[in-house]
Amino acid sequence: MIEYLEELKKTVQQRHDRQAEHMQSVPVKEVFEGKTVWEGSVEIFTLRNAKAKRCYAWGQRKEGGGWEMTTVLEIPPVVSPLTAVRAALAAQAKRQVI
């Protein structure tokens, strides 16, 4: 778990060009029309000297190994781990439509 958190922290810092510190892990379950569409742990990082004070991040294992990392800044309407997951799912759905 420590290696995973370090990898997430590194990803957050690289993508957003800010120092990050892990704050906490929050379990999230997103249900749509009675079906679970996403379930996992969202890691909350605080960001130094940034407009967004927090970043929500999580990773999913790739089939060939390694991780696919998702990071979402806390900028309204993203104000919680759940809204970060919803924003990421909406962005993913939009990319699949185009």
Image (spheres, rainbow, N blue to C red):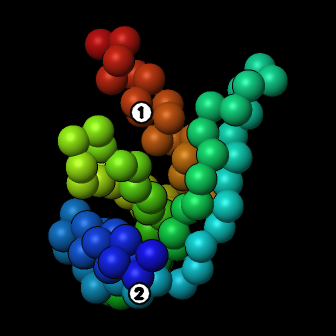
Q: Is residue 79 left or right of residue 72?
A: right
Estimate the spatial distance between the alpha carbons at disc 1 and disc 2, rounded to whole Å: 25 Å
Establish if 98 lies above or below 36. above
Q: Is residue 21 left or right of residue 32?
A: left
Q: Please state the horizontal and vertical placement of residue 25, each as a whole percent of the image.
A: 59, 73
Q: Please state the horizontal and vertical placement of residue 29, each as a whole percent of the image.
A: 70, 46
> Taking the image as drawn, is residue 16 in sight?
no
Total residue callouts: 2
Q: Please state the horizontal and vertical placement of residue 47, each as a whole percent of the image.
A: 39, 81
Q: How crowded is the residue under tag 2: few (<14 C-alpha within 10 Å), some, or many (20+)?
A: some
Q: Residue at x 29, y 72 (%)?
A: 7
- Which corner quadrant holds the C terminus? top left
Q: Residue at x 55, y 62 (%)?
A: 42
Amino acid under disc 1:
Ala
Q: Is residue 9 left or right of residue 86?
A: left
Establish if 60 lies above or below 10. above
> Taking the image as drawn, is residue 8 in sight?
yes
Q: Please state the horizontal and vertical placement of residue 88, each as a whole percent of the image.
A: 46, 41
Secondary element under disc 2, as helix, strand or loop, is strand
Q: Residue at x 40, y 55 (%)?
A: 59
Secondary element under disc 1, as helix, strand or loop, is helix
Amino acid under disc 2:
Glu
Residue identified by numbered label 1: 91
Q: Residue at x 65, y 67 (%)?
A: 26
Question: Which tag, 1 or 2, sits closer to the chain's start?
Answer: 2
- Which corner quadrant holds the N terminus? bottom left
Residue identified by numbered label 2: 21
